[in-house]
Amino acid sequence: MRIGMADPILNHAARTPGDAHAPSRAPSRRAAYRARLLTFRVDPALDEHAAVYHEDGLLIVGDDGKVVAFGDYASLHVTLDANTPVHAMRDKLITPGFIDTHLHFPQTEMIASPASGLLPWLENWTFPAERTFEDAAHAADVAAFFIDELLACGTTTALVYCSVHRQSAEALFAEAHARDLRMIAGKVLMDRHCPEYLRDTAQSGYDDSRALIERWHGTGRQLYALTPRFAPTSTEAQLEACRTLARAYPDIFIQSHVAENHDEIRWVAELFPERRSYLDVYDHYELLRARAVYGHCIHLDDADRIRMAETQAIAAHCPTSNLFLGSGLFDFDAAARTGMPVTLATDVGGGTSFSMLQTMNEAHKVARMGGHHLSALRMFYLATAGAARALDLDDRIGTLAVGTEADFIVLDPAATPLMARRTARVESLEELLFAFALLGDDRAILATYANGRRVHARGMRQSALAHA
């Protein structure tokens, strides 16, 4: 075996004009990584031995980008052949790549826009920004930047809202597929209570969604999410079309918003007076099921939470967005009491950071405001194995288990002078992870790997990596 202190740049081969949607080809991904290693078997809230941690570990990746082995260096290094390079980073921590379960790629350029609340924010900032995505070239440009930003923050899979325009989804999928990333996305459906320039129809939304499903769901690592924006902006006819698509494609994802804001909830009650609750609107149209992810879920009652647990629908907690827009505080104790599945999400651009570490920071504080202690171990679980399990993808991503896709990140405990000083004093794994969560951001991500290939190196954008 060969030992190397630095990880070589793994280049993307240039794509030919006729091969725009094909993943890039690269040199062999066979390699081993010696570092601290962390993954999870189960939820740390349920089992104190949930974490699998190796202080001196070895992660071995095969030619196909899958995990070949994971464990103690002392046991595994003797199994390596002479042609497998070993990248030594003993003071770093390798974890599975982060999974962001709710964010909006057309809102990238309007992040941190001031507003008095959710509905004015949509009207004054979001809708005008999304209008620009009718331009396919603009959509492609933002898609490249958006994915660069995700990778810089250690996010290797995301559940993404595109704009109402079919070409926005095409642009995002094409960019993710070219980089061999696993992404889940969908064209927004919105046929009322929005500007005319962003309005589709029940029929056009159905046709566009079906065409995108047929083109992209299961193409390479891409997956499709049926995406009604939220109940107020879809007519009954459009929600019925969603039901039809959901029945026809039982393995696609579903994503929308629910119970984020009191004004929004009152509006839904006026529009759907026959429904018991906001959540019940989606339930009526058979949009609560496994692989259905609902952003926010702040102002639910226990009947709603129990219904989500029964249907295996997922709550995506978006703390930076909830605080920024003043929407409210997510109730972790109520979620635990009712068994409602929970994940973490940035909700860019209502959320104020692409970083899942910054999202953990705010999630911990939101939980404390509700009297709940959210441990660092559980936050890392929710952003990796927990998200993968909730999304029914834990056989492929979210862990470092043998046979899974080698999506992982290298975290640097000395990324900043303050982090270096703090982490030099840690005495437990929980303390180390807590320092990452409370002090970390994109600077803590030394490198990001997708399917065994390095796709981000700190200080270098993807465009630089491609030509290094």
Image (cartoon, rainbow, N blue to C red):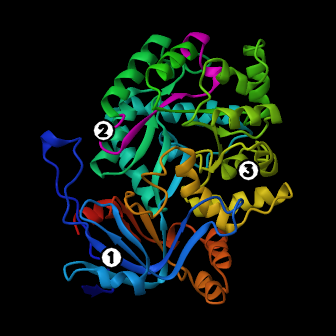
Marks 1 & 2, CB-CB < 8 Å contact: no
Visible in this render: residue 129?
yes
Q: Nearer the viewer, residue 9 or 123?
A: 9
Magenta extent: 217-238
**From the viewer's perspective, is 291 left or right of 215?**
right
Q: Earlier in the sequence, mark 3 or mark 1?
A: 1
At a point 39% along the width and 28% down the height, the residue shown is 134
Magenta run includes residue 225 = yes
Tell me the crowding category of disc 1: few under 14, some 14 to 19, or many 20 or more residues within 10 angstroms, Cα based. Answer: many
Where is 447 relative to 3, above or below? above
Q: Position of residue 181 (x, y in %)?
A: 36, 51
Q: Looking at the picture, which amino acid does disc 2 mark?
A: Thr
What label sits on residue 323 in the rendered view?
Answer: 3
Task: Check disc 2 and report the residue beneath it.
Answer: 219
Q: Spatial distance from mark 1 to mark 2, Cα to Cα?
A: 28 Å
Q: Amino acid at mark 3?
A: Leu
